[in-house]
Each structure stands twice: as structure tokens, then as C-alpha cells.
Image: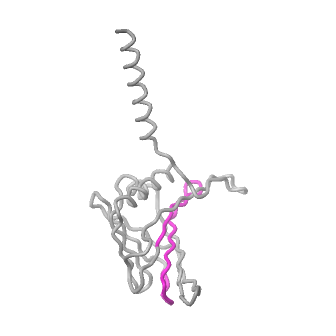
């Protein structure tokens, strides 16, 4: 009987440790270092919004990421279209996220950003790289409730995309990690 109790106790302990390990959040950053001048910690992570579907004219690829330097945050966005466009991201252009709890979160571009055009095997690509202001409270909302939809203005163009549940969870995890 004592042997059975010991084995049962070890089994329960093993399950408990496995559960803790699986529920622990692992944060991965694209970079995580200290600024050599200010000694402030800087880190950032990225996540995928769209790989090839949604948007307008041609299916764009869209990635975003949270960045932190000390207590200052911003949201970075890279979107690539398979076409030549002259539209600009205007200062104050929004990115709007609808969260799974029904709340809407909006962030605004920090400056004006122009596209960079490149040609590759006869195809022209226009790439935008923008930065958007975001605070810790807004990031916390994204961490607490995964986004399900995103809408972004680029000049007169509008990019809209439903966010898959898996990608929404990745965004929430990236948000939680950048706050640590």
C-alpha cells in the first residue's frame, strides 16, 4: 500500500510540474538588449497579420511588432503590395483592431511614411514601414483579449483583414511579453 501511495504521489507531482511548464509563457524577442548610451533595455517582437490574402488590389503581406525602449512603446508595421503605389501613410493614419471581447483599439501613425518600391523578376513591390504610437494600457488590452480584425489606412487605401484565432493568440502573447 505504501508503495502504491508513493507512486501515486510521484505521478501527481509529475502532472503538476508538466502543467506548470505548459502554462508558463515563453517570451521570444527579435532583439533584447541594452542601449549602449542610455543603458535602457530595448526589445521587440513581431507577429504575422497576413501572408497572402485580404486587402485591396493585390494580396499584401503584413507583419507587425511591438517595440519597447525603457518605458516607451511603439507598434511597427511592414506591409508589402505586389504593385507600384504612390500612396503615403499620413501622420495620424489609424490602425484599428477589434478585440475578441468586442472592444475596439486604435493606434495612430507617428509620422508620414512613403513606400519603397522594388522590382524582382519583373514584379514591382511597394513596401511600407511605419511606426504607430501605443501605450502600455493599450498593449495590455491586446494582451487580455486577442484581436479578431484589423483595419489600416494607407493614404486613400484601406487594408482590412480578419485575424485567425491562432494569429490573434500570438498577438496577445507578443503584447504580454513586451510588457514584461
Question: What is the x, y in percent for residue 175?
Answer: 45, 55
Placement of 71 over or under 15, stated as above or below: below
Residue ID at (43%, 68%): 49
Front-lying residue, 18 or 74: 18
Could you say where residue 91 lies in the image, as x and y percent from the top left?
49, 78
Which quarter of the rendered picture does the N terminus lie within?
top left
Find residue 17 and report its horizontal and vertical position in percent.
44, 31
Question: Horizontally, is 160 left or right of 135 in the view?
Answer: left
- Check residue 139 for magenta coloring: no
Q: On the rendered structure, is 104 left or right of 153? A: left
Question: As drawn, which residue projects farthest toward the top?
Answer: 2
Seen in the picture, residue 105 relative to 9 is either above or below; the reply is below
Q: Residue at x 33, y 67 (%)?
A: 149
Q: Quadrant of residue 148?
A: bottom left
Q: Which residues are magenta?
A: 62-90
Residue 89 falls within the magenta-colored stretch: yes
Amino acid at each position: 500500500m505504501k508503495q502504491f501511495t508513493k507512486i501515486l504521489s510521484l505521478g501527481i507531482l509529475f502532472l503538476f510540474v508538466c502543467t506548470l511548464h505548459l502554462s508558463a509563457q515563453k517570451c521570444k524577442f527579435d532583439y533584447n538588449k541594452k542601449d549602449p548610451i542610455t543603458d535602457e533595455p530595448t526589445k521587440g517582437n513581431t507577429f504575422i497579420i497576413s501572408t497572402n490574402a485580404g486587402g485591396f488590389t493585390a494580396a499584401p503581406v503584413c507583419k507587425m511588432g511591438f517595440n519597447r525602449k525603457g518605458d516607451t512603446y511603439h507598434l511597427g508595421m511592414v506591409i508589402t503590395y505586389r504593385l507600384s503605389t504612390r500612396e503615403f501613410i499620413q501622420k495620424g493614419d489609424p490602425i484599428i483592431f477589434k478585440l475578441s471581447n468586442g472592444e475596439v483599439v486604435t493606434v495612430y501613425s507617428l509620422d508620414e511614411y512613403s513606400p519603397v518600391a522594388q522590382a524582382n523578376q519583373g514584379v514591382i513591390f511597394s513596401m511600407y514601414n511605419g511606426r504607430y504610437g501605443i501605450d502600455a494600457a493599450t498593449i495590455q488590452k491586446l494582451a487580455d483579449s486577442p484581436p479578431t480584425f484589423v483595419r489600416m489606412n494607407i493614404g486613400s487605401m484601406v487594408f482590412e483583414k480578419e485575424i485567425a484565432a491562432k494569429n490573434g493568440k500570438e498577438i496577445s502573447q507578443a503584447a504580454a511579453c513586451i510588457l514584461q
